[in-house]
Structures are given as C-alpha cells and as structure tokens.
Amino acid sequence: MPRALLLSALFAVGCVAGGPDADRGPLGKADRTGTCAVDTCGGQSSGGSCFCDEFCDKIGDCCDNKRDTCDEPLEALTYNAGLARGAVTFTEERLPHVIDALRGTEADVVCLQEVWDDDDVELIAESLTEVYPHSATEKTSNGSRFFFPQCNPIELFTLNGCVTDCQAQGKSVFDCVANDCKPDYDELGDSCKMCLAANTTSPALCSLPAARKVAWSGRNGLMMLSKQPMDSVSYAPFDTLLLERGVITAEIGGLYYQCTHMSADLSSVPYPAEDRAFSSWAEEQLAQVDVISDSAPPNSCTVLLGDLNTGPEGAAIHSELPASFDSLLRSGFSEPWTDRECTHCGSNPLVGGDHSSQIDHVMYRNCGVTPDYAVTLDGALDIEADGDKHTTRLSDHYGLRSVF
C-alpha cells in the first residue's frame, strides 16, 4: 500500500467468535433453505441452510430475506465541496459551514471531491473524527511545468479584469469564463486556454515561463469518510491531462465503496494535439469507466460515489457526456432514481446561468437494493466577505444522498 495513502482503517472482524465456519460456501437457489427471523440475525437460520450474519454477503449463503429482516438501512453521500480557493468563490468563508453540515449528516459513508488543499484535508478529518473516525485520501502530486510563455499579457489582463468583476457577484471562475467573460476568453490561443485551466488560482503565471502544467499541484481532491473501519483500501489513477484523477476503493462493513471524480467536459479548452491515447475530454472520461469497473470485485456489492461529470441522456435536466453514463450502466452499475434533480444548478448563486445538470451520482452494482435518493446540502448560506454580506450556498454543487 502506498505511503501516501492516508487512512485510519482497522481490520474489522465479525461479532461471531472465530468468524464464519471454514466449510461454508456459496449456496445456489435450490440449496438455499430457511428464512431469517429477528432472533436468528447474526447466525444461521433456524432449521435451514442459509445464514443471517454479517459474513453471508461475502460468502454467498444469505437467506433471501436477510437484508429486509436483519440489516439496518445504510446511507451513502457524495458531495463536491468546491473547496477551490481562487476558483470557487468564498472558499475560506464556506469551509467551516461545510464541516458543520457534514457533522450533521446521517450518512454512513461520504465521498468528498475538490478538497484540494492538504490543510483542508487534515482539518476536515480532525474536525469530524467523532462522527467519522475513519478516512482515506491519496496524496497525488505532479509538479511538471511549462517553460515558455502561454498567454499574451494584454489579453490576459483584459480577461482577468472581467473575471474579477464577475466573481464579485459570487460566481465561480469556471462559470465566469463560460458565460460573462466568454468573448474575452475566446480571443485567447489554445495553449493559453490550457494553461489557464491548470492555473486558475494564479493565472498571471501563464504570461511567465513558470506556469504549472497540472492543476492543484497534482492533487486529486478525493476524500472518503466512514463511520466503520475501512479495509482493503486502494487507489487507482486515471490517465488524464490537466488534473490528476483516480478512484479510491475500500471495503466497509462487507460492502465495497468507490469514491471518484471523473474528467469534466471542458469543451471551452481544446484538447492538446499531441501524441495522446485520447483525442478529446469525452474520450478521456470514457476510459475511466473501465478503471472504475476493474477496481472493485466483479461479484460483490459495490457503491459508486462521486462527481462523475456525466449523466443520463433524455433526462429532464441537461445531459453531460451521456456515453460515459451508458458505459457505466453496461458495466453493471445502476442508479434507479426516477425523479432526477440537478446537483449542479444554474439557480445556485455560485454557478449562475441557465445550465443545470445531474453529474453527482450514487450508483450500485451487484447489490440487489432499491435505494431512495434525495438532493441535500442545498440550503441558503449567509456569509460575510470583505465587509459585505452575501447569500450563497455551501458549494457550487449540491450533495446527493442515497439510503439502501
């Protein structure tokens, strides 16, 4: 396990002395007799061959009604916290409120995205240790740089002035560039646009010979929190430009959970014309589905959480890169949420505009559950910044919770 893997995970053993019997094995439907009752939860069904304990999901000998009778409902939460100083407005002011909101959630497992700063990772873990004593992050790093100027200083100055005025309205730098400041942004060359995407917190570097090639110092921004101990924690990197991305996988309470943040549809940033395995951001994202699928056991219940930057085609809200969502479905994941709502919404003051999409997801594979879904962490937030009062939100994303 890499030394960079930060986790407070302990090996979890069952409450049944000595664990499961050595001769237990998977039961076929014809061999599965008996049912669970309240007094057999934690052991074998009375007079039957099937089991009602915590090991049966992994072994494959659960009674058909084990989940309904013996299992407490579990809640999973994905949340892009938008802790991106210089990019998503009011990061410093929002951070303590984000921590308080997470402390009040009832989720058993939380997948956070965009926790870019090492100090923020440490603060969140320490602040929530009583609620979530177990956490996992993978500290990736890539310090590669460009060594030649990328942007015309005059054009950069004009764009920066527009973005500064736009952010004063509470919008993120991404939405300012995509909407309010689009005419100025469109005047820039392709290499300049790529450089700015990697240096959102210090765009002036793109007119100097020292601009970063990878954003956020190569951090991936992922953080998984759990009430129960984590076992078999691993990290699988994606093949990406601009941002280091990947997926954390952990076994928690006999189930597998995955926390990820897939590549975004950066249509305003031309994909570099170099010797690459992919020719577009869409292709880069699509390849990540295979990494996610291969990172979890093929026959175990897996819960996939994260800002996937993709969504189903035909939804009432805008569909982002639906080919990747379809690929996730083909690989066995599902998200049976009928009345979908946006999680990245134009009505959010940190976003603005008319573009709304559901790109944050909780998906299931091999779980045999019918989960409930609800958008959360979406309430108004009153803050004071630079002497002015603002009504905003906790993040430019809303959370998505699922109970199963």
Image (tube, grey):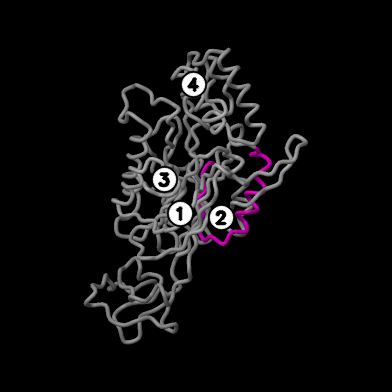
At label 4, the amino acid type is Asp
At label 2, the amino acid type is Thr
Q: Do we see residue 226 in this rendering?
A: yes
In-front residue for pair 368/292 = 368
Label located before the other in sequence (3 or 4):
4
Name the residue beneath numbered marker 2.
376
Question: Distance between the Cα atoms at labels 1 and 2?
Answer: 13 Å
The label nearer to you, 2 versus 3, is: 2
In the rendered structure, find residue 277 and report the number of the disc placed on it: none
Q: Quadrant of residue 47?
A: bottom left
In the rendered structure, find residue 340 and report the number of the disc placed on it: 1
Categorize mark 4 by other alpha carbons within 10 Å: few (<14), some (14-19), many (20+).
some
Identity of the residue drawn at 55% across and 49% down: 398
Residue span colored magenta: 90-114
Categorize mark 2 by other alpha carbons within 10 Å: few (<14), some (14-19), many (20+).
some
Question: Distance between the Cα atoms at labels 3 and 4?
Answer: 33 Å
- SS of the residue at dot 3? strand
Q: Quadrant of the C terminus?
A: bottom left
User: x%, y% of residue 198?
Assistant: 50, 27
Question: Distance between the Cα atoms at labels 1 and 4?
Answer: 33 Å
Position of residue 36 relative to residue 150, above or below, is below
At label 3, the amino acid type is Val
